[in-house]
Amino acid sequence: MTDVLHNVSPPVAPSMAPPREFVHIEKVGMTFATKKGPFVALRDIDLVVRRGEFVALIGHSGCGKSTLLNLVAGLLAPSHGVLLCAGREIAGPGPERGVVFQNHSLLPWLSCFDNVHLAVERVFGATESKADLKRRTHEALGLVGLAHAEHKFPHEISGGMKQRVGIARALAMQPKVLLLDEPFGALDALTRARLQDELVRIVAATGSTVLMVTHDVDEAVLLSDRIVMMTNGPAATIGGIVHVDLPRPRERVELAGNAHYHRYRTEVLEFLYRRQGHVEEAA
Amino acid sequence: MATASLAAGAASDTRPVAVGRVTPIRPPAGAAVPVDPADDPEGLARRQRAEKEARRLAQREALRPIVLAVLPPLLGFVLFIGIWTVIAQATPELPPPAKVWRSALNLFADPFYRKGPNDQGIGWNILNSLQRVGVGFGLAAAIGIPLGFILGRFTFLNAMASPVISLLRPVSPLAWLPIGLLVFKAANPAAIWVIFISSIWPMIINTAVGVQRVPQDYLNVARVLNLSEWKVVTRILFPATLPYVLTGIRLSIGVAWLVIVAAEMLTGGVGIGFWVWDEWNNLNVEHIIIAIFVVGIVGLLLEQALLLVARRFNYA
């Protein structure tokens, strides 16, 4: 197990002290052209994500949090401002940013193994042997606990397992940043809790930087170092940031009786339902 | 007779299922009345009767779907043959079903004889028609499917091609025959040409639509994984489009088989269409009716075979 973790964790160059700031979002705005004219989805977003940090984006639906994630992923280009990753401008998707989609987005005609292998092949195919690529795929699936199901097809496994394959696919590319778009949104509460714990374990093991979109307050407080709270759209922006200063590893049952945990939780709830409560009007 | 054997087969098939359904009820019933059956012979008999009744009900219940699946089509055929018989009695030119059946038995007793170029067995005629359809349809697929991919992928080319396609698609297949005769100066290639031109459109259109309808999620995966254009085509576009392509193929085969009879009537040679025309000249109406059934059955088989293939590639 330790061997597996060692292999999947990103290589760390000890000689170079990498800058703490890793993802820069500077004065970013996003305007979509629609049939009814321009629609301002995001404006004036300024955010810096540090290396190894776990940042959650939270807000009501339609507030543009997924848009912001897609901007960092490079699937969208901003109308205003600049996004940087590791000092380079984000001009499109790149293997240093692994994305886990909300609806898992596995290719239904490929087995779990082949779904992950597709990503591995693209990133490491030029430099590594076929056996190495296979080993990486096995390890990524092993990391999410699906080594036994790797030859199953997506329609043969449960929703939670599909999402785990999606995470394995993103992790297998050894991204420097993991971008998660409501990864557990479609799952039942028990499965979600288990996958959250797994994510915590994987992030701790790989030292990944994570940017995660969620609408689940408990999930945000349990997982994050910082919670970025978005105002309601249109023209959404960052309404406030909560620093979650809870020691790790965090244990969900213990946290249930933790006063700090409740304070953070209340703070986010306060923002979402008192200050940004008019979600029906906005939608 | 067919019904009897079907019903018997169904009954023997369903018996184990029926027993399986009844047995789970027994242990709780036994547990609820902890009396030794020997002490209570009347209760035992009653229980056995109830059990038998339940088994009979379960059996009937299991038979229901089979009966419901078989009965309506069977009734449909019976009605069809009944109407046919009535009409045949009213019009002496139209042979009744029994006469056609005898004629068919006779015909299919030796389907592969050859007595000169214009007198060959029904088997040869069917095979020749199938071959023409195969060649014409194969060429249409070889050109239509790649073309559909290109049109689906490039909006500009699609906008260029779609008015021309819209104009040519509704043209009656046989209107293309003179062009074929003119260009190829022979009957057989002209017939193949007609099959080709009339069966190419569904494949182009369905493939193009399929490519356009590839879910954005899959294309996002392609972008996030930074896949090469080749991988995008082989791993995402092609598999995602395949169900649409197969629908196009199925429609095309249907059209091709529909058109072959008419084309062969005009071009002659050996083939089911020409055979119909030949039998018309011989005033052999039984054979014409047999040909109609043969064309229908072969078309049905082609369709079913392709549906089977399509089911294999249904990923949902």
Image: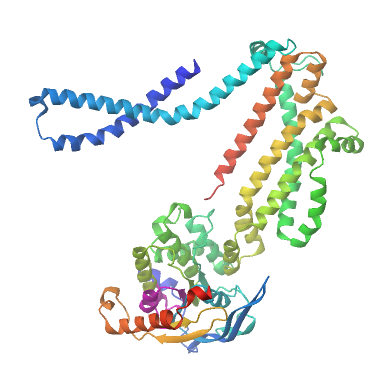
Q: Reply above or below: B77 against A226.
A: above
Where does the N terminus of chain A fall, quadrant-wise? Answer: bottom left
Residue A171 at least partly seen: yes
Q: Is residue A223 magenta?
A: yes
Which residue is pictured at 44% across the width and 71% down the height? A8
- Residue A246 on the magenta span: no
Q: Position of residue B46 (x, y in %)?
A: 18, 25
Give the percent coordinates (x, y) of residue A102: 49, 66
Let me know if residue B271 appears in the view. Answer: no
Residue lying farthest front? A281
The answer to which quarter of the image holds residue B188 is top right
Residue at the image point whose x is 9% and y is 32% from the top:
B35
- Quick one: which residue is furthest to the left in this view? B39
Residue positioned 51% across, 60% down in the render: A106
The image shows residue B111, relative to residue A25, as above or below, that is: above
Residue B25: x %, y % from top left = 24, 35
Looking at the picture, tell me which residue is in the foreground, A78 or B61.
Answer: B61
Asked if residue B129 lies left or right of residue A277, the reply is right
Of the pair A276 and B193, the residue shown nearer to us: A276
The quarter of the picture where residue B270 lies is: top right
Image spot of residue A90 (x, y percent): 60, 80
Above or below residue A96? Residue A140 is above
In the visual, does B9 lie left or right of B30?
right
Chain part drawn in magenta: A202-226
Q: State the scheme by which the image is colored.
A: rainbow
In the rendered structure, the answer to whether residue B70 lies left or right of residue A83 reads left
Q: Nearer the viewer, residue A61 or A228?
A: A61
